[in-house]
Image (cartoon, helix red, strand yellow):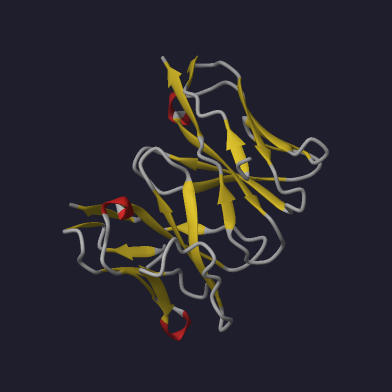
Amino acid sequence: RKEVEQDPGPFNVPEGATVAFNCTYSNSASQSFFWYRQDCRKEPKLLMSVYSSGNEDGRFTAQLNRASQYISLLIRDSKLSDSATYLCVVRANSGNTPLVFGKGTRLSVIA
Amino acid sequence: GAGVSQSPSNKVTEKGKDVELRCDPISGHTALYWYRQSLGQGLEFLIYFQGNSAPDKSGLPSDRFSAERTGGSVSTLTIQRTQQEDSAVYLCASSLGDPQPQHFGDGTRLSIL
């Protein structure tokens, strides 16, 4: 089983739609969780950290379910500019240990 | 500079040649990471440096790969006797430390002919 698994998509949604991505991770000792965004041929950029209690940043909501070892990202009122690949990222331990990246879920928001 | 700087941005070389990729992290960042991303694949961890500690080399795919970080700042990733499967984008990231995020450079796109 891969350490971090995501549905590769693509998810093609109209502007204004709500879309959700899920991600599962295999290492139950994982401590930190993130969603990164990667535009085509660009470097990954941190979108948001994921906290145990769930957290929201504008139109984006992230949730963590430790028991089931999955993370979700919800995007409301999708914009054309949201089109990108969304990477689920996990860190096994605290400290500066390397991040483990999922392969990403591609989102295309269509006018 | 304000961000992580990588050079060259593109590198095309013949199979069997050695290549050096450079990363200049954000000033003051103690942690530095190398990843690579093959076409259509996720990011693959290669190596990371934390201050003066011995680097974590657990992600290096073979002994043809090595990296150094001089003076706790600039890092060089060296690939010897390149193979076609080494073709990828090599990304460098730096961080102040957990829980601060990792900031990525633009990457070096390496193509082995």
Is B105 on the left-hand or right-hand side of B8? right
Say if residue B32 shows up in the picture.
Answer: no
How far from the left and from the top, in percent, is residue B104?
Answer: 45, 57
How far from the left and from the top, in percent, is residue A94?
Answer: 72, 62
Q: Looking at the picture, does residue B82 appear above or below residue A83?
A: below
Image quadrant in which you'd find residue A60: top right
Is A31 on the left-hand or right-hand side of B105? right
Task: Work out which quarter of the rendered image holds the N terminus of chain B and state it.
Answer: bottom left
Which residue is more in the foreground, B82 or A60?
A: B82
Say if residue A35 shows up in the picture.
Answer: yes
Is A4 on the left-hand or right-hand side of B24? right
Q: Looking at the picture, does residue B54 appear above or below residue A102?
A: below
Image quadrant in which you'd find residue A42: top left
Q: Please give the name of the residue rendered at 61% of the width and 42% of the height, measured from the top-left corner.
A: A4
Which residue is more in the foreground, A84 or B85?
A: B85
Q: Please give the name of the residue rendered at 40% of the width and 72% of the height, measured from the top-left corner.
A: B66
The number of callouts visible is 0
How far from the left and from the top, in percent, is residue A8?
Answer: 50, 29
Which residue is more in the foreground, A48 or A66?
A: A66
Is B69 on the left-hand or right-hand side of A94? left
Q: Please give the name of the residue rendered at 45% of the width and 69% of the height, measured from the top-left corner.
A: B26
Q: Looking at the picture, does residue A3 appear above or below residue A106?
A: below
How far from the left and from the top, in percent, is residue A11?
Answer: 50, 21
